[in-house]
Image (cartoon, rainbow, N blue to C red):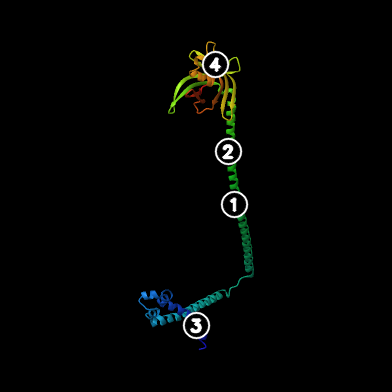
Amino acid sequence: MDVFKPFLQRLSQPILLSFCIAWIFWNWEIVVALCWYDAKTIEKLGYKNHIEYIDTMKDHWRNYFWPLIIALLYPISILILNNFHTFFKMLEEKLFTKIVKNATVPTELYLNAQDQIEVKEKRISKFIALETKMEGTINDLIIDNKDLNNKLSLLNDEFIETSNIKTSFENRLKEVDRKIEYYTTKSSIEFLEGSYDLELLKRIGGGQLSTLFSGTINIKKNENEEKYAIYLVFNKYEFISEIIEYYYNLVNDIIIIKTKLITDSSFTVVEFENDTLSVIERELLNGLIELPQMISEKIMFSKDIKFGNSDLRLDLIKHKDF
């Protein structure tokens, strides 16, 4: 018995564990019922309680013999496999020893091989060190590249923003230059020089207009003097109105002129005091005249006039070919 004692001690624990695993495998219905079935589930299966359910599972082979047989076979199988492994390992060692037992290597060949191994080891060590250094350099370059890309992105954003600001300033400067040129041009009386269509219109309701008078006027410099005058020809009469003063209201964009009517001795103002020409005289030819800014590309100046109970409008349309 003393001979089998170590063997039995070694097999005691694996047998118990193997028996438990085998028993659970063969009697899984009992394990499931104990772990997951409650009283209601057992009753639904047609049993009063767990004990009655387990009694139906009684089978000596199933409950004892087969788990015990498997428990005994498992450690025996493990023991046999371990012995086979040990046997083949010992056989391999013996064969290797037999092969190299009588082998001899010359000292010079051994030393040369050893030197070559050391050289290769040094080369490998240098290669590994160089590779490690290169990896570090590559990582540093990757980090630097990321930093440069971030800086480039920031510089690109700043460049775009600066370009936008520059474009905005350039547009503003162009607009300022245009306005300065516009205001400078309007500030000179030469701005008025030209040939115009003169229309006197009457509002007749519903946004409709009726033409009361249509003619042509010329604003030009006198031949013998440095003064400008307005020339209006109507029938046999020629009306000349001298522009005495010229102002440009920058705030309201309105041109203000002071005119003085000059007529032939055969012409008297009484003749047209109550007709449309008297309106033209009052609003354009004689006195302090306001010319509001253009209201469209076609009409140069336009102003509303109140004459008695009538609502009138006077338009000056400058000829483009002047």
> What amino acid does circle 1 point to?
Lys
Disc number for residue 146:
1
- Where is mark 4, residue-wise? 240
Instruction: In the rendered structure, find residue 168 and report the number of the disc placed on it.
Output: 2
Q: What is the spatial separation of the Cα atoms under label 2 and label 3, in whole angstroms?
A: 94 Å
Spatial CA span between label 3 and label 4? 141 Å
Which residue is denoted by mark 3 in the rendering? 12
Asked if the residue under mark 3 is in contact with the one under mark 2, i.e. CB atoms within 8 Å, the reply is no
Task: Identify the mark nearer the N-term, 3 or 1.
Answer: 3
Neighbour class for label 2 at 10 Å: few (<14), some, many (≥20)?
few
Q: Earlier in the sequence, mark 1 or mark 2?
A: 1
Q: Position of residue 253 (x, y in %)?
A: 56, 29
Q: Is residue 153 above or below residue 190?
A: below
- Distance of mark 1 from mark 2, alpha carbons? 33 Å
Can residue 314 be seen by looking at this rendering?
no
Disc 1, disc 2: CB below 8 Å?
no
The disc labelled 4 sits on which kind of residue? Ile
Front residue of this view, candidates 226 and 285: 285
Q: Are marks 3 and 4 in contact (CB under 8 Å)?
A: no
Inter-mark Cα distance, 4 to 1: 81 Å
The reply to whether residue 96 is in sight is yes
- Residue 250 location (% of width, % of height): 59, 29
Q: Which of the two discs, 3 and 4, labels the residue nearer the N terminus?
A: 3
Nearer the N terminus, badge 4 or badge 2?
Answer: 2
Q: Position of residue 67 (x, y in %)?
A: 43, 80
Q: Nearer the viewer, residue 198 or 80?
A: 198
Query: Which of the two discs, 2 and 3, labels the residue nearer the N terminus?
Result: 3
Q: Residue furthest front?
A: 309
